[in-house]
Amino acid sequence: MKTKKILLSLILLSLCVALLIYGVYNNIESIYYVLFNGKTYYSSGYSEDAFHMISEGWDESKVIYVLGEPMTIQKLDFVNSWAYYATPSNKKSSELTYNLFGPITRISFDPNGIAIQVTGDFLKDVSIGMTQESIESNWGSPTSVIMQHAGYKYSYSKPGRSGTYKVRAVIFDENKVVIEKENYIYFDV
């Protein structure tokens, strides 16, 4: 009888530990949010369930009907910037590397793919007015690309005192059609 109680206790303890590990593994972001004293303020009428309903392709009026008015609206400018720099020869394609002190060339393009700004010293003979196609045919694919289409960012959350908060925003294109959502925890450490 005593052996059965010990065995049952060990099974229950093992189950509790397994559930705890599962919960930590699948919800680590929320644990960090609590540890960093996160506090989020939301716009009036906002709910997490409604936010998760928002889908790519929705128009502005439907989003506002479901989520309410945003706390802030930010105009997003078009950005298309390429960078060329040396990468280690043993780098795996999935690895992210940074070249903090080596030569680099950064090229910014207008919406038509024409270079409007060239800085740095990694590539020679790159100049304002060149097209993306001519640059890529001469020097190959860029090492990194930053691309952002013009549009609008409707923010439905803001941080509390600690600075750590749950970012909730809807990104619209220039026609105010949803192209993506921002849904993550920003850690102010």
Image (cartoon, rainbow, N blue to C red):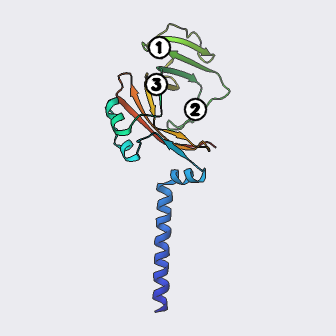
Q: Residue at coordinates 50% horizontally, 7% vertically from top-left?
A: 129
How dense is the environment of label 2, judged by Cα within 10 Å: few (below 14), some, or many (20 and up)?
few
Identify residue type, mark 1: Asp
The quarter of the picture where the N terminus appears is: bottom left
Disc 2 secondary structure class: loop
Give the mark, 2 or 3, whose residue is nearer the N terminus. Answer: 2
**Residue 174 relative to residue 109: left or right:** left
| Residue position for label 1 | 110
Q: Residue at coordinates 49% horizontally, 21% vertically from top-left?
A: 79
Between the residue at mark 2 and the residue at mark 1, the CA separation in whole angstroms equals: 32 Å
Disc 3 secondary structure class: strand
Query: Which of labels 2 and 3 is toward the front?
Result: 3
| Residue position for label 2 | 89
| Residue position for label 3 | 148
Percent x, y of residue 151: 42, 23
Q: Residue at coordinates 52% horizontally, 11% vertically from top-left?
A: 116
How dense is the environment of label 1, judged by Cα within 10 Å: few (below 14), some, or many (20 and up)?
some
Residue found at the very far bottom of the displayed protein? 1
Between the residue at mark 3 and the residue at mark 1, the CA separation in whole angstroms equals: 12 Å
